[in-house]
Amino acid sequence: MGDQQQQQAVDQQVASSPAYCAKDDMISSVMALEAALLPCLPARELQAIDRSPHPSHQIDVDRYARDFMEAAKKLQLHFVSLQREDKPTKVEMLRKDIALMEEELDRKNELIKKQESLILEWKKELKEQMDKHKTELERV
């Protein structure tokens, strides 16, 4: 059940996310991700070199990490939304199948009508030939 609730939460976030559809939103999310990541690198290096965690360095790292995670989440929501667009629902798949079957049915109905008209023409020709033969036989 937890997975379903989590999926529903992601679905709601995807639907309400500003990065839901637009390509520009994805690009801005990538840029925000990059902008949040770049400051983290020097701050972490300074903290590692110093070996005594200064509160200001830790605050910077936490803030940059939080910004990075927010940008990563937006980007993830965008990719989830793209994945959902590519995967049609059952209703859409059934509608597509029905439309294809209806097209096939129309095509086959046209073929049947064409064949029926050919058969009628052949019957007409056969009848004419039969009448011709009957008249010739009557003459003889």
Image: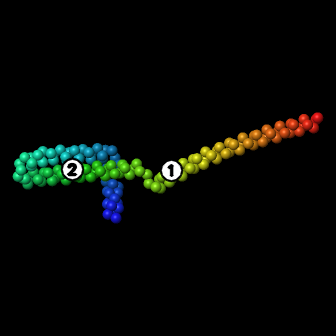
Q: Residue at (64%, 47%) from the top-left corner?
A: 109
Amino acid on which the number 2 mark rests in the picture: Phe
The quadrant of the image that shows the N terminus is: bottom left
Tell me if I can see residue 16 in this picture: no
Q: Rounded to the nearest whole Å, what is the CA distance between mark 1 and mark 2? A: 41 Å
Q: Position of residue 29 (x, y in %)?
A: 27, 47
Q: Residue at (15%, 45%) from the top-left corner?
A: 41
In terms of secondary structure, where does tag 2 sit? helix
Q: Which residue is mark 2?
A: 68
Residue 125 falls left or right of residue 31: right
Amino acid on which the number 1 mark rests in the picture: Lys
Question: Which label number is shown at residue 75?
Answer: none
In terms of secondary structure, where does tag 1 sit? helix
Tell me if I can see residue 130 in this picture: yes
Q: Counting residues from the N terminus, which is met first, the one under dot 1 or under dot 2?
A: 2
Question: Which label number is shown at residue 96?
Answer: 1
Between 67 and 100, which is closer to the camera in this rendering?
A: 100
Q: Residue at (27%, 52%) from the top-left corner?
A: 73
Residue 95 falls left or right of residue 115: left
Q: How many marks?
A: 2
Q: Position of residue 75 (x, y in %)?
A: 28, 49
Where residue 89 sits, quadrant-wise, is bottom left
Q: Residues within 10 Å of mark 1 (few under 14, many from 20)?
A: few
Residue 98 falls left or right of residue 137: left
Q: Residue furthest right?
A: 140
Where residue 126 sits, quadrant-wise, is top right
* Vertical relation: 125 (above or below) 20: above
